[in-house]
C-alpha cells in the first residue's frame, strides 16, 4: 500500500530518472557527433557522468523530507526484526509495560490530587487564614478574633473573607430523618471561592435558609427542578432551600449543605473555626502574610496555645486540601520510579544479550557503508518501537491500576479523588516516559553494539567483546538488586510500623463492645432532665438485651472524633493549672469499656444530682494532683476561676486512654457522672456502649427506635472496628508500598535469572572443559552459585547503603520504629539473598547437566 | 569539479555554484546538460561542473523558487527538463552579484602587497 506522499515521491523519482537519462543521452549524442564510436561514446559518457545512483541520492537529499523516508524504513526494519524473535520481544514489551504502567498510574493520581488546580477562578488566590502549629498544618481562630480581623485589616488584604465550621445535622421532612454533613458559614463564603449557585442563589440577609449540594439534591430530592423555596428541617429547624451548588463545589470536602452561621463573639467559650479568604489582586502573598502576622500579634491567644508553637500564616487552600496526601504520594512516586529503573535494567540486559547475537550483522552493515550514527539510530528505533508497544499496554495497566487504587484507598487518604482520571496530561507523560525509557535502556547497548572494534568480530571466536558486555550485565544486575532492596526495606518498615500500631495498648478494650450514637434534637429534648430521662430509659432497656453484660454511656466515645477540653485547677495548689479532656459518663462505664480502675471506685447511682459533686480522673491527672500519694479524696475544679461550689471530689482513678488516633499519646481526662451534668450540649449527643458476647446490633437498634422512633438511625459498630477504621490510611499506604516492592522483587528475580541463564549458555565450552577435566555436578553448580553470590553481595551492600540514606524519607510515617531498624534490614537482606539464590537454581542445574562432548563440539 | 589533469581541482562554495547557475540562466532557459556546457564554455574549460553537484543545485534552486522547471521536447524528440530563471531568481541574482563583488574586493585587499614590499 502506497501512501499519497509515497506516490508523489515515486513520481519524482521517475522524473529525476528520466532527466538524468536524457542528460546521459545528450552527452553520448555529442560524443558521437564529435566522431567517437557508439560504444566508446557510451563508456566515456558514463564515466564522465559519474555514478548515477550517487547523483540520484544527493539530488534526492536536496528535496528534503528524506528523514521521513529514513524513519519509515527504520520502523519497518525494527518491526521485522522484533517479529523475528517473539519471545524476546514479548518479555521486553511486558516488562516495559509494567514499568511504564505503574508510573503512569501514579502520575494520574498525582495529577488529579496535587497538580491540577482547584476548580475555582484564580484558585491560587484562595487561602486559609490562621495559624501554623507543630501538630497541624492549620489551626483556625475564634469568632471574636475573626470579627477583629474582618473589621481591621481584612479590606486591605482580601477581596472576600469568610469563616465556616463543619456541621453534622439531622435532615427531616420528605422522607426518613437522616444525618448529613455540611457547613455553617458566613455570607461571603461563596464569594471567596468565586462560585455561584447552579440553581437559585447563595446567602444574603436571611438566616433561615439552606443551600444544598448537587449530590444531595440528586439523591434525596431527585433533582427536583422546583426545589427552590421548599422547606426542609435541619436539626428540627425549618429552613427554606434557596440554592443548589454545582457538582464541582466541594468545600468542605463531602459537604451536602450550607447554612448561615451566627458568630459567637463574647469572650470565654468560643470555638476554633476555619477562616478562608480571597486575596486581593494587588497584594502579593508574602506581604499579606506579614501584615496578618502583625495583626495576629495583637490577638490574645488562649492559654494553652503558646506563641512559640503558633505562627500566624496564610496557607493556599490547595495545600490544605491536599495536605497529608502529599508526602505519601511523593513516596509512592519515588517507589514506582525505582520499579521503572529495574524494568529498564532488565530490558537493557535483554538488549545486550540480543545484540550480542547480532554482532555479525552489525559488522557487515558497517562494512557496507552504514555510518555508526545510522546504525545507532536504527537500533534505537527498534527499542523505541518496543517502548511504544509497552506504553500502549502500560496505559491499559495504568487504567486498571488507577481504578483499583481508587477502590481500595480509604477516603481520607485521597482528597479530590473525583479529579483523578486518565486524560491528555497523563498520555503526554506516558509519551515522555517512552522517550526516556528508550534512552535509558537503549543508549548503552546500542553504543556497545556498534563499536568499531566489532569489525574484528567478522573473524570467528572473538571473545574480548563478550567480556566487556559481561561486566555491563553484571553491573545492571547489581543495580537491580540494590534498588529492589531499597523498596523492600521501605515496605517492610511501613508494614512493621502498621503492625506496631495494631499492638498499641489503648487503655481500653474494644473487643465485644458494641456502640452506637444518638443525638437528641433540641426541640423535643429541651432540658437536661428530659435528656437524662431518655438515656435512663434506653439504658435500662439495653440491660435487658440477652447477653448484655455491661451497659453504659459516654458523650465522646474514643475514636469517634470529638473532644472537649478545658482548664483544670487543684484545690490547695493554686498555681497548678493544666488542661484536660472532659467526658461525661454513666455508672460502670469503665467496666463496660474495659478501662482499668486503678484506685477508688466507679460512679454509682448514689452520685445523683443532689449528691456532692464527684469526678473520676485518669492517671496523669492523678499524678499531677497528688504526685506522691493518693489522688482519691482530693478536690479539683473545671473552671479557671472556681467558685466554692465548683470544687469536685475525686472518687476514682482510671487508666489514661488514647482518644482519637492510635499514634497519639494517652491523654489526661476528667470524667463526670451524667447525673450531675445538666447542660444539654454535653449530654444530648451520646454514645452507648454495650459489652456483650453475641451480636446484638439489631436488638440495640430496636431499643433506640422503641424509645424514640423519630430519631435518625445510626449504625451499631464494634468499638474495635472503630479503632481499625482509624488506621485505614497507614494500612493502605503500607500495602501499596508492599505491592510495589513485590513487583520490584519479581522483576529483579527475572533479571537475575536471565543474566545467569545467558551466562551459563555463553560459558558452555568452559563448563564442558571443566567437566571433562573432572569437575562434578556439584562443582559446576557451585560455580554458578558463587557467581550469583558475588553479584548478590555487592548488590545487597550497595542497596543497604542506599537504603540507609533513603528511608529517612519515611520517618514521618513510621510509628515506634526507626528508619534504620536493624532487624528489618537484616530480614530483608536475607529474603532478597534467598530470592537471588533461588533465581540461580535453574541455571545452576542446567549448568551441571552440560554434556562435555556436546559442549566441546559446538565450535 | 571535473578532473582535468593539468588543472588542480577548483573547489567552489555551494553558494557560488548557485550564483553561476542563476547567471547562466540569465541568457535564457536551458536544460541541465546545456547549463553544464555553457559554464564550461564561458570559463574556458576551467569550470566543469559534475552532475553530482549540478543536479542537487538545480533541484535546490527550484525548491527555493528562484528557477522554474518544465518538461519540453528537444529537437531530436527527447523529453528534457528545462530550467528558467524566475522573477524572484532575477532579484536574487542581483543580490548574489553584489555579494560576489564584495567578496572579490575583500580578497583583493588581502592579496595587495604590504607597504614597501615587492611582489615577484
Image: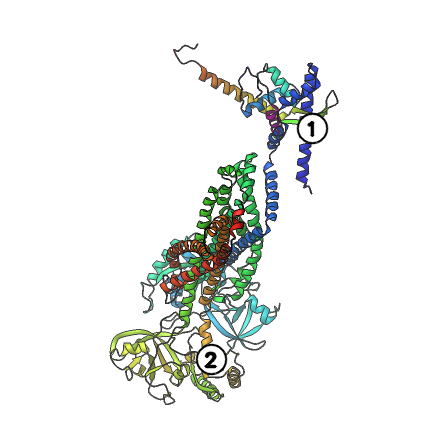
Establish if A11 lies above or below B119.
Answer: below
The residue marked by circle 2 belongs to what chain?
A: A
Query: Can residue A499 be seen by looking at this rendering?
Result: yes
Mark 2, secondary structure of its residue: strand
In the rendered structure, which segment of residues is drawn in magenta?
B48-62
Q: Residue at x 45, y 76 (%)?
A: A720
Establish if A805 lies above or below B88.
Answer: below
In the picture as drawn, the residue positioned furthest to the right comes out as B77
Mark 2 and mark 1, same subunit? yes
Which residue position is annotated with label 1?
Answer: A18
Query: Colour scheme of this structure image?
Result: rainbow
Instruction: Give the mark nearer the N terminus: 2 vs 1.
Output: 1
Establish if B32 lies above or below A286.
Answer: above
Which residue position is annotated with label 2?
Answer: A515
Picture coordinates of residue A745, whole percent (x, y): 47, 59
Front residue of A283/A165: it is A165
Picture coordinates of residue A531, whole percent (x, y): 45, 84
Amino acid at each position: 500500500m502506497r501512501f499519497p506522499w509515497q506516490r508523489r515521491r515515486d513520481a519524482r523519482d521517475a522524473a529525476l530518472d528520466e532527466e538524468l537519462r536524457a542528460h546521459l543521452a545528450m552527452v553520448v549524442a555529442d560524443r558521437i557527433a564529435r566522431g567517437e564510436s557508439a560504444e566508446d561514446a557510451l563508456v566515456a559518457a558514463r564515466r564522465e557522468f559519474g555514478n548515477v545512483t550517487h547523483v540520484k541520492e544527493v539530488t534526492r537529499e536536496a528535496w528534503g523530507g528524506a528523514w521521513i523516508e529514513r524513519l519509515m524504513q527504520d520502523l519497518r526494519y525494527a518491526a521485522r526484526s522484533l517479529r523475528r524473535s517473539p519471545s524476546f520481544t514479548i518479555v521486553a514489551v511486558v516488562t516495559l509495560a509494567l514499568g511504564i504502567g505503574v508510573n503512569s498510574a501514579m502520575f494520574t493520581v498525582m495529577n488529579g490530587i496535587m497538580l491540577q488546580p482547584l476548580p475555582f477562578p484564580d484558585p491560587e488566590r484562595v487561602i486559609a487564614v490562621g495559624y501554623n502549629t507543630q501538630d497541624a498544618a492549620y489551626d483556625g481562630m475564634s469568632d471574636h478574633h475573626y470579627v477583629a480581623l474582618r473589621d481591621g485589616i481584612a479590606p486591605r488584604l482580601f477581596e472576600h473573607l469568610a469563616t465556616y465550621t463543619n456541621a453534622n445535622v439531622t435532615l427531616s421532612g420528605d422522607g426518613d430523618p437522616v444525618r448529613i454533613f455540611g457547613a455553617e458559614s458566613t455570607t461571603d463564603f461563596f464569594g471567596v471561592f468565586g462560585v455561584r449557585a447552579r440553581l437559585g442563589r447563595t446567602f444574603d440577609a436571611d438566616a433561615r435558609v439552606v443551600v444544598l449540594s448537587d449530590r444531595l439534591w440528586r439523591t434525596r430530592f431527585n433533582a427536583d427542578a422546583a426545589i427552590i423555596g421548599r422547606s426542609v428541617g435541619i436539626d428540627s429547624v425549618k429552613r427554606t432551600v434557596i440554592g443548589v451548588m454545582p457538582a464541582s463545589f466541594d468545600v468542605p470536602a463531602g459537604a451536602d449543605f450550607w447554612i448561615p452561621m451566627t458568630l459567637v463573639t463574647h469572650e470565654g467559650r468560643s470555638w476554633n473555626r476555619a477562616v478562608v479568604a480571597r486575596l486581593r489582586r494587588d497584594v502579593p502573598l508574602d506581604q499579606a502574610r506579614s501584615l496578618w502576622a502583625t495583626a495576629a500579634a495583637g490577638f490574645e491567644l488562649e492559654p494553652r496555645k503558646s506563641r512559640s508553637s503558633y505562627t500566624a500564616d496564610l496557607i493556599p487552600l490547595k495545600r490544605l486540601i491536599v495536605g497529608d496526601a502529599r508526602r505519601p504520594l511523593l513516596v509512592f512516586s519515588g517507589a514506582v520510579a525505582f520499579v521503572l529503573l529495574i524494568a529498564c535494567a532488565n530490558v537493557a540486559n535483554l538488549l545486550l544479550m540480543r545484540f550480542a547475537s547480532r554482532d555479525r550483522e552489525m559488522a557487515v552493515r558497517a562494512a557496507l557503508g552504514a555510518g555508526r550514527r545510522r546504525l545507532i539510530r536504527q537500533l534505537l528505533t527498534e527499542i523505541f518501537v518496543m517502548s511504544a508497544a509497552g506504553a500502549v499496554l502500560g496505559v491499559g495497566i495504568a487504567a486498571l491500576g488507577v481504578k483499583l487504587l481508587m477502590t481500595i484507598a480509604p477516603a481520607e487518604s485521597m482528597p479530590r479523588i473525583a479529579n483523578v482520571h486518565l486524560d491528555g496530561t497523563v498520555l503526554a507523560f506516558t509519551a515522555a516516559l517512552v522517550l526516556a525509557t528508550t534512552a535509558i535502556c537503549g543508549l548503552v547497548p546500542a553504543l556497545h553494539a556498534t563499536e568499531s572494534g566489532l569489525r574484528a568480530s567478522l573473524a570467528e571466536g572473538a571473545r574480548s567483546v563478550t567480556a566487556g558486555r559481561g561486566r555491563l550485565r553484571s553491573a545492571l544486575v547489581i543495580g537491580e538488586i540494590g534498588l529492589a532492596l531499597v523498596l523492600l526495606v521501605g515496605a517492610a518498615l511501613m508494614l512493621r510500623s502498621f503492625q506496631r500500631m495494631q499492638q498499641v495498648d489503648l487503655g481500653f478494650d474494644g473487643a465485644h463492645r458494641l456502640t452506637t450514637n444518638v443525638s437528641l434534637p433540641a426541640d423535643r429534648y429541651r432540658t437536661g432532665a428530659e435528656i437524662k430521662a431518655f438515656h435512663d430509659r434506653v439504658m435500662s432497656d439495653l440491660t435487658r438485651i440477652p447477653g448484655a453484660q455491661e451497659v453504659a454511656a459516654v458523650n465522646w466515645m474514643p475514636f469517634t472524633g470529638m473532644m472537649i477540653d478545658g482548664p483544670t485547677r487543684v484545690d490547695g495548689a493554686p498555681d497548678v493549672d493544666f488542661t484536660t479532656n472532659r467526658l461525661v459518663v454513666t455508672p460502670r462505664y469503665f467496666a463496660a469499656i474495659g478501662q482499668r480502675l486503678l484506685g477508688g471506685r466507679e460512679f454509682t447511682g448514689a452520685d445523683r444530682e443532689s449528691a456532692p459533686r464527684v469526678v473520676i480522673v485518669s492517671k496523669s491527672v492523678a499524678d499531677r494532683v497528688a504526685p506522691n500519694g493518693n489522688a482519691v479524696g482530693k478536690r479539683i475544679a473545671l473552671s479557671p476561676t472556681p467558685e466554692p461550689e465548683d470544687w469536685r471530689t475525686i472518687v476514682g482513678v482510671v487508666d489514661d486512654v488514647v482518644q482519637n488516633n492510635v499514634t497519639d499519646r494517652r491523654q489526661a481526662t476528667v470524667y463526670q457522672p451524667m447525673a450531675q451534668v445538666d447542660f444539654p450540649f454535653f449530654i444530648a449527643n451520646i454514645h452507648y456502649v454495650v459489652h456483650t458476647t453475641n451480636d446484638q446490633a439489631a436488638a440495640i437498634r430496636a431499643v433506640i427506635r422503641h424509645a424514640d422512633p423519630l430519631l435518625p438511625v445510626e449504625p451499631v459498630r464494634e468499638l474495635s472496628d472503630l479503632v481499625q477504621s482509624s488506621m485505614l490510611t497507614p494500612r493502605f499506604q503500607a500495602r501499596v508500598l508492599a505491592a510495589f516492592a513485590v513487583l520490584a522483587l519479581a522483576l529483579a528475580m527475572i533479571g537475575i535469572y536471565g543474566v545467569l541463564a545467558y551466562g551459563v549458555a555463553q560459558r558452555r565450552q568452559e563448563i564442558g572443559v571443566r567437566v571433562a577435566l573432572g569437575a562434578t555436578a556439584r562443582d559446576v553448580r557451585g560455580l554458578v552459585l558463587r557467581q550469583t553470590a558475588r553479584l548478590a553481595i555487592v548488590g545487597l551492600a550497595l542497596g543497604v547503603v542506599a537504603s540507609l540514606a533513603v528511608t529517612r524519607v519515611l520517618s514521618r510515617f513510621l510509628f515506634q520504629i526507626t528508619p534504620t531498624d536493624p532487624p528489618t534490614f537484616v530480614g530483608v537482606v536475607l529474603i532478597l539473598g534467598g530470592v537471588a539464590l533461588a533465581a540461580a537454581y535453574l541455571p545452576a542445574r542446567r549448568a551441571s547437566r552440560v554434556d562435555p562432548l556436546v559442549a566441546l563440539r559446538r565450535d | 569539479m571535473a578532473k582535468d589533469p593539468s588543472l588542480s581541482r577548483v573547489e567552489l562554495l555551494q553558494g557560488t555554484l548557485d550564483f553561476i547557475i542563476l547567471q547562466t540562466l540569465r541568457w535564457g532557459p536551458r536544460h541541465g546538460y546545456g547549463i553544464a556546457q555553457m559554464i564550461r564554455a564561458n570559463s574556458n574549460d576551467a569550470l566543469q561542473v559534475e552532475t553530482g553537484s549540478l543536479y542537487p543545485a538545480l533541484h535546490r534552486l527550484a525548491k527555493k523558487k528562484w528557477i522554474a522547471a518544465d518538461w519540453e521536447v528537444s529537437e531530436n524528440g527527447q523529453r528534457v527538463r528545462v530550467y528558467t530563471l524566475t522573477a524572484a531568481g532575477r532579484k536574487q541574482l542581483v543580490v548574489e552579484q553584489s555579494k560576489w563583488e564584495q567578496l572579490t574586493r575583500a580578497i583583493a585587499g588581502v592579496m595587495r602587497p604590504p607597504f614597501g614590499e615587492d611582489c615577484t
